[in-house]
Image: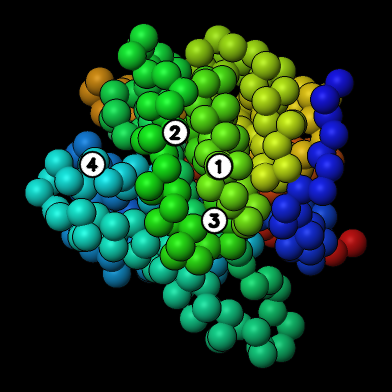
Amino acid sequence: MGKERGATIGTEMLEDLIDKAGGCAVVDGGFATQLERHGACINDPLWSALCLIKDPDLIKKVHLEYLEAGADVLVSSSYQATIPGFLSRGLSMGEAEELLMKSVKLAVEARDEFWDIKKDMQGHIYNRALVAASIGSYGAYLADGSEYSGCYGPNVGLEKLKDFHRHRLQLLVEAGPDLLAFETIPNKLEAQACVELLEEEKVEIPSWICFSTVDGENCPSGESFKECLDIINKSNRVNVVGINCAPPQFMESLICKFKELTEKLIIVYPNSGEVWDGRAKRWLPSKSFGDDKFELIATRWRDLGAKLIGGCCRTTPSTIQAMSKVLKERS
Ligand SMILES: C[S+](C)CC[C@H](N)C(=O)O
Ligand SMILES: N[C@@H](CCS)C(=O)O
Ligand SMILES: [Zn+2]
């Protein structure tokens, strides 16, 4: 079935955190969402990466808020931060490279400061968090909603996708995160590009690859998750697979499906259920989950086999706090 995990690089570090967290580690929540709640204006082709230029202190503040809420894993602010994106804003290559590395450093600084304060406090409930460097899909960079369609057009092939991701990945790794987080991958070709790149660059830290979905059954391109996971299963540089930024009501059946298709650890961090209108660049209200529903459903996702659970767009520190509370309850 091609389910073998083999000796996957760096899995011990993740398994250790998962154990310490009581069987399921908590990932942070919507990063851009929380920047916006603090008043950041990110209606821009760079989206949340605009804050790397304009307000890095706010980025650190949001990381600290998610740590306080109970996140065991912080995802860096690099989702839509890219070299071509920064160059098109008139930044130099050196400045663009520095900003990418800074995204990781801000998360590491927040983690270290937070842990320095908490680690010796009596009876605290925290773990030393890991920092995952976010690598948003090519569709995120295009800023046309294609991370939810998977349609990159006929001119985007495997080599182009690898070229797009390569330099950023090198810089993010150099900045010293604990792991890499590929987010909202919408098609099989980009999953293959990520896998090949990890191999070509001989990346020695663990990584996760997360897909988006709009129908709850396949990835946005319509290709099956079986096709996608068959590619990922062959790699010993991908430790975790799952779903991010898709409606929470899809998670139960997708965790079960992924359990059938892979031996890798499973992660889910859905959005609130609202839908992104890529043209109007706004969230459309629809059946969305509040924190109370996330709190009720998180243990179900854990019991079905998810080992990392968090939130994506339109979730907030209070969502993460609610899930952390139930996931870490000691019986
Ligand atoms: C996860 S979506 C809401 C991110 C923003 C999108 N890539 C855009 O720029 O429109
Ligand atoms: N890590 C990103 C993902 C966007 S889909 C964020 O939370 O903003
Ligand atoms: Zn999202």
State the separation of the CA atoms marked 1 and 4.
Answer: 24 Å
Question: What numbered label is drawn on residue 162?
Answer: 2
Q: Position of residue 276 (x, y in %)?
A: 37, 26
Amino acid type at image mark 2: Lys
- The reply to whether callout 4 and callout 2 are in contact (CB within 8 Å) is no
- Give the residue pinned by disc 4: 85
Q: Badge 1, how many Cα within 10 Å: few under 14, some, many 20+? A: few
Q: Mark 3 = which residue?
A: 132
Q: Amino acid at mark 4?
A: Gly
- The residue depicted at 40 percent of the width and 14 percent of the height is 151
In three-dimensional space, the C-alpha distance between marks 4 and 2, rounded to whole angstroms, equals: 16 Å
User: Which tag, 1 or 4, sits closer to the chain's start?
Assistant: 4
Counting residues from the start of the chain, the first of labels 3 and 2 encountered is 3
Q: Is mark 3 within 8 Å of ligand 2?
A: no
Q: Which mark is residue 72?
A: none
Point 56% across, 86% down: residue: 117
Q: Earlier along the polypeptide chain: callout 1 or callout 2?
A: 2
**Element carrying mark 4:** helix
Seen in the image, is 164 located left or right of residue 279? right
Q: Are marks 1 and 4 in contact (CB under 8 Å)?
A: no
Residue highlighted by disc 1: 200
| Nearest to viewer (mark 1 / mark 4) | 1
